[in-house]
Each structure stands twice: as structure tokens, then as C-alpha cells.
Image (spheres, rainbow, N blue to C red):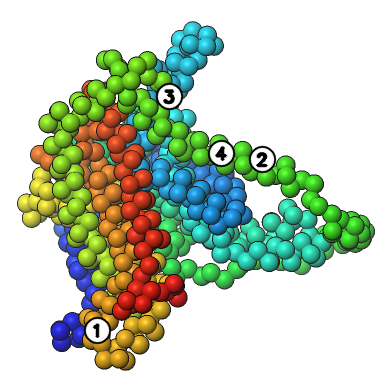
Amino acid sequence: MNTLYRLGQFSIALTFPALAILLAVFGLPAVLLFLSSLNAPDFSLTNYEAFFSRGANVRVLLQTVEVSVIATLMCVIVGYPTAYIFAAASKGLRMALLVLVVIPYLTSFLVRTYAWIVILGDGGLINTLLLELGLISSPIPLIYNRMAVYIGMVHIMLPIMVLPLVSVMVGIDKSLSAAARSMGARPFAAFCRVFFPLSLPGVLSGSLLVFVLCLGFYITPAALGGLGDAMLSTFIAAQVESSFDLARIAASSFVLLGLAAVVLGIFGLDLSGAQDSRPHPAWKSPPDWLRSFGAPTRRVKELAARHRAKRWASTLYQAAGRGHLWKVVGTAFVALVMFYLLFPSVVVIIMSFSAGPSLHFPPRALSLQWYRSFFNNPSWTDAAWISIQIGLAVAVLSTIVGTLAAYGLSRTFPRLRSTLTMTILTPITIPSIVVGIAAYLGLLKVGLIGTKTGIILTHSIGATAYVVVIVSATLANFDRRLELAAKSMRASPLRAFTRVTLPLVRPGIIAGALFAFLHSFDEVVQTSLVSGFSVRTLPLKMWENIRHEIDPTIAAVASMLVLLPVAWLIVFYFTLWRSRPTVSGVPLETAS
């Protein structure tokens, strides 16, 4: 008890387990990897010079940047109006729409990639429909090209853009735009001068996250793109499979990592909650020499201002005639976005009930043969059982160390908290393949390649980051005076934590554990590197089938994985919304 009390006085010590795992699995191996890229102990830039001296490498690098930028812009173009409509909706409708966005976000990206293969393939849904309607005589090439890559990447990344945008937009005071309207500003001007500048932090955070994650894309471009659509992660994976030249792989990995680090360093992504939330002006005042050119137009603006004032006064108490039209347009737009996000999963579920030797949409006859094939095939069930075992172990480990770290971070100095939080979040803010290669090098040194323990440790560093984010968000709304009140009534630190703090943060802990399990259950890039081909998880089995089209059973597996996030949300609902936290048996309505 005294040990726990002394440990509680040094909150920073609670982050040590998470930092120790991160340092052992990723930190130190990343340093060794960087030294290998420099040919230590000779220290030269030969490997980097070799990388940039080859035109093919440079083209792949530029192509990676190009694809990532365009995919990010597409996410902004689609995500911003979607988030704006979400933020303007009522609270109940907004929550329902966010749930519909979260479901595909939590669905396995392998499932979503497979769904687009089913839809865009030569024998897929679109080509089959067009052939049956007689609009085409032969399948059109909808897959294995750049557009298919964009469709798949935007489908996966769009929720990551929408969620931070909605979070920022909901927090914007609507009275500011109303005040601008009351002073004669038109709706578009009020939006451009007031609302949009205040929403820029969400645009920046979402864009940076999407761009950095797109840099590390490997599965989707490899499955949906052609030979000319390879990205740098695909190039690195090919190096690993063909000839494991550690120095060259290290150089390629740090080129990709350096690109991500430069972008994050320039724009200053901060997921720790320490970002500057003060509103910034939309633009600075023009210099004096530029301002002098505006003198001839001032008289025209004054006349226009008088006209706008008269028009505003005459229409102040009139009903807005365009309101209904914009509602219809907004509803149609959101419906299209929801269709884009949800329809691929629906297609996979329906096709999984196809009878016969192949899959069809819609099925010509209904059958459970592919589900029976899954449960009667040991290669599928063994892979699923291994993934479940690893996922549960990752959930337990990451929840314990992540909760301790989040609790310790909530009680440290803001600047130190920001630094440590960003350190813990490193595995999910840099390309996944770089983390996998560093983890491979670290586990190779201790003989854990090809073991479940090695995979658990590799998955845990990313899962811990998610737990820290979720539990920290829960602790941000926790009133520490409740804990102090319990201690003032002679409750020990342990008793105050178990009777006061734990009941209030329990929903966040459970949500973090479930998210950690899903993260592990869906991981394929890092697993493929550290499994050593001796531990075959369900995602690895699925990826093999997607690449070689071996077994239609994957449709049944994919449909079951689509239902996994739905089950997660149901558990989260009963944990967070239906359970009333209590302190010593007294229900609390709020924790803030």
C-alpha cells in the first residue's frame, strides 16, 4: 500500500511500462535500423545515395506523395461538407450519423478492400450489371488502375477525416456566425469569415492524419492498383520478400519516415490535446503598398453596403426561401456519402449467402455453404483462433499499461504531458511498415520472430496508443475534486481510485480494450513481417486469398468481420450510455 502511495506521488512513473514496451519493441530497434542505413560504424550516406540515384526509386517516392496528396484532397472535399452537415444536425441525428461513419471505420480494411474488388472486378457487381443491361459488350477496366486505388483509399480514410472535423465544428459557437449575419453579412460571407477559419484546426488535423497514413498504404494499392501504381511501402515490402538487404531496406524505410516526419514537423500535428485552440484570423491585413490600390473601389463598396443594409432590413423577418432546397441537397449529399461508406460491406454480406461454386450479386440462390466451409476448414478456424488469442492478450496488456499511462499523463505538467503523449502515439502516426521493420529487427535480436509473444508485443505498441487516447479523453472530463473529497474523508489512494475514479473512467477503459482487440485482430502489415511464416493469423490468411483468389469462403469471413464492429458498438453503448457510474452507491449524472 505504501509503495502504491509513493508511486502515486510520482505520476510520471505510471507511464514507464508503456514507454518501456515502446522502447524495447520499436525505439531502440529504430535507432539500430537508422544506424544500419548509415552503414555504422563506418557512417556513410551510400545507401541513401543509391536510393536517390535510381530513377525508379524516385518515381515511386514521387508517386507515393502524389497519391497521398490527391487522396487527402479528395477526403477534404468530401469530408468537410459531410462534417458540416453532421455538426448542423440535431444531437440525436448527429450521433446516429456518426455511428454509421464509425462502423466502416472499425471494419477490417482487408474486408473493405475485398469489397471493392468484388464491386470493381471484371466479374464484379458493376460490370455484371452493365453487361446484363446491354450497355457494354465486354467488361470495362475498373480495377487495377489509379482510380481504383483512390476509391479504396478514400473509402478507408474518409472516416478519419470526418471525425476530427465534426469534433471541432461542434465546438464552434454558433452565435458567432449569427452575429455576423445580424451585421449584414451574407451566409456565404459569414461562413468564409467566421466559421471556416475556426474549423481549420480540424481540417489540419484530419488532413495530416490522412496524408501520413496514406504514405504507409500497402494493402489497398497492392490489391486494387496496377503495376504502375506501386507505393513506397509496396517497394519496401518487395525488398523484404526478395532479398533482405537490411541496409537498403533501412534507407528506404527512413526515406518514408523522414517524409512523414517533415510533414508533421512543418504543420505541427499534436494529438495530445495541447494544440492551440485560440481562433486565428482568416488572413492577415494586406501591406500598405497593396492597400493603396483599393482606393478607387471604396466608393463602390460604400454604395453596395447601403444596398445590402436596406436588403437585410427588408428580409430580416422573412422566412428563408432557400432553406428547404439546401436541406434537400444536404440530405442527398449525406445519403450518397453513407451509401459510399456502407454499401461495399452490404454487398459482401449478401454475396456470402450465394449458392453454387462461385459468388454472385444478387445471389441466384441462398445457401450457408461458405459459412459451413469456414467452420469445417481447419486452416480458417485455426487462423481465427490464433487471432482471437493474440487479440485478447494484446487487449489485456495494452489496456493495463495504456490506462496507467493515461492516468499518469493526466496528472503531469502540460508540456511534459504533450511530449510523452506524442511519444506513445508514435506507432500510429508513422507508416505501419516502418514500425513493422523496426519491430522485426528488435524481435530478431531476442529470438521472438515467428512467435505469438513477438506478435503480441508488436501489436501492443499500437494498441496502447489507442487506449491512451480513449482513456485520456475520458479522464479529461473527470472532476478530480471527487477524488480529493474521498481522500479528505480518510480514503486511501487505492480505495479512492477503485471507488471514485475507476467507476467514472470504466467506460473509457472498456472502450480502449475493445479498440485494442480490433486493432490487433485487423493488423496484417506488421504481422506479416514478424510472424516469420510460422504464425498464421486470420488477416494473413485473408490477404493470401485476396491476392490469389483461392477460396470464396473469404466472403463469409468478411461478412462476419463486418458484424464485429457492430457488436463492439453495442457493448460500448451498454457500457457508456446505459450504465450509470456510481460513487459509493450514489449515481452520478455527470463527471464534470
Mark 1 vs mark 3, foreground winner is: 1
The amino acid pointed to by label 4 is: Ala
Q: Earlier in the sequence, mark 4 or mark 1?
A: 4
* Callout in the foreground (3, 2): 2
Q: What element carries label 4?
A: helix
Q: For mark 2, what is the residue?
A: 329
Horizontal and vertical percent for residue 219? 32, 37
* Contact between labelled residues 2 and 4, with CB atoms less than 8 Å apart: no
The image shows residue 447 at horizontal and vertical percentages of 6, 51
Measured in 3D between alpha carbons, the distance from the residue under mark 1 to the one under mark 3, in whole angstroms, is 58 Å
Q: Label 1 belongs to which residue?
A: 493
| Residue that label 4 marks | 335
Q: Between disc 3 and disc 2, whose residue precedes? A: 3
At a point 51% along the width and 48% down the height, the residue shown is: 97
User: What crowding class fits label 1: few (fewer than 14 Cα within 10 Å), some (14-19), or many (20 or more)?
Assistant: some
In which image quadrant can residue 407 be found?
bottom left
Residue type (three-letter) at the residue carrying disc 3:
Leu
Camera-side mark, 3 or 4: 4
- Local crowd size for mark 3, using a 10 Å CA cut-off: few (<14), some (14–19), many (≥20): many
